[in-house]
Image: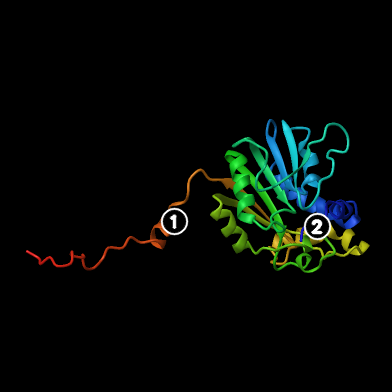
């Protein structure tokens, strides 16, 4: 069941949510380091991570799923947020350069349709960053945070889903190695724990972060798979009309 937008806002206004935002945004910003002149879309609840792009991008949009609810963003000025059906976004083809999907893929009933829609609106060579709860992490097992809702993913599951929707994964990371507790000791140690966990590539990060590039063609292996899945068959014996003897 999707988490409500009010609960999402409350989480990111908390001390634990602020730590999670800083940790994830650091990686997002490293991957989308220069977005001058770009159009950027956040799908799901991505507003905590979009503010950094507003000064350099041509436009920054925040699309929130209808089942989750919507809030005005940014807080001042003209609104750039909208309540949409994330599998049928009100945008033309190839109009977005960068997309960020957060609190969306794990809660939608149609993950293939969501990523296919992201593929449709991305420009050729456009890139997307997807953030999802990690199946092996502690955050996915406790529903006290938004990352404890919906379906968590393993790296293999997420990679297969991206390839099926014509994306090529180019970068993988895990984050949120700190436990999802509000104790000050853990919150103060967050930077050290994240650095330690990331340097050792420990397999129990709270979220998976993957960057992928839009492909304009289906990989050869996929075409061969389709070809072998439905082999052409010929009858062993050619039927003859009844009552007619062969010459």
In-front residue for pair 175/225: 225
At a point 68% along the width and 33% down the height, the residue shown is 38
Q: From the viewer's perspective, is residue 153 above or below residue 122?
A: below
Q: Upstream in the sequence, badge 2 or badge 1?
A: 2
At a point 21% along the width and 65% down the height, the residue shown is 239
In-front residue for pair 84/167: 84
Q: Is residue 80 left or right of residue 32?
A: right
Crowding around mark 2 (Cα neighbors within 10 Å: few <14, some 14 to 19, many 20+) is some
C-alpha gap between disc 2 and disc 1:
38 Å
Crowding around mark 1 (Cα neighbors within 10 Å: few <14, some 14 to 19, many 20+) is few
Point out which mark residue 3 bears. Answer: 2
- Asked whether the viewer can see residue 11, the reply is yes
Q: Is residue 119 left or right of residue 245?
A: right
Q: From the viewer's perspective, is residue 132 above or below residue 74?
A: below
Q: Is residue 214 left or right of residue 192?
A: left
In-front residue for pair 180/10: 10
Looking at this view, name the residue that lies furthest to the left: 247
Measured as percent of width and height from the top left, residue 139 is found at 78, 65
Measured as percent of width and height from the top left, residue 240 is found at 18, 65
Q: From the viewer's perspective, is residue 230 above or below residue 29?
A: below
Q: Secondary structure at mark 1?
A: helix
Q: Secondary structure at mark 2?
A: loop
- Asked whether the viewer can see residue 177, the reply is no
Point out which mark residue 221 bears. Answer: 1
Measured as percent of width and height from the top left, residue 80 is found at 78, 36
On-image quarter of the N terminus: bottom right
């Amino acid at each position: 069941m999707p988490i409500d937008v009010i609960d999402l806002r409350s989480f990111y206004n908390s001390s634990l949510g602020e730590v999670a935002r800083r940790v994830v945004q650091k990686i997002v910003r490293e991957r989308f380091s220069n977005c001058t002149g770009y159009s950027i879309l956040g799908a799901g609840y991505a507003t905590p991570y979009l503010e950094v792009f507003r000064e350099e991008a041509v436009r920054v949009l925040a699309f929130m799923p209808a089942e989750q609810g919507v809030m005005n963003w940014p807080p001042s000025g003209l609104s750039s947020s909208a309540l949409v059906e994330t599998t049928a976004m009100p945008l033309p083809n190839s109009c977005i350069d960068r997309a960020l999907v957060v609190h969306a893929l794990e809660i939608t009933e149609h993950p293939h349709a969501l990523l296919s829609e992201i593929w449709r609106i991305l420009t050729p060579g456009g890139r997307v960053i997807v953030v999802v709860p990690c199946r092996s992490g502690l955050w996915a097992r406790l529903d006290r945070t938004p990352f404890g809702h919906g379906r968590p993913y393993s790296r293999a599951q997420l990679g297969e889903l991206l390839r099926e929707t014509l994306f090529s994964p180019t970068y993988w990371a895990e984050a949120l190695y700190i436990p999802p507790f509000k104790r000050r000791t853990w919150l103060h140690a967050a930077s050290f724990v994240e650095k330690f966990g990331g340097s050792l590539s420990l397999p129990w990060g709270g979220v998976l972060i993957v960057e992928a590039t839009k492909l304009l063609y289906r990989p050869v292996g996929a075409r061969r798979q389709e070809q072998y899945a439905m082999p052409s068959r010929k009858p062993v014996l050619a039927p003859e009309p009844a009552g007619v003897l062969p010459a």
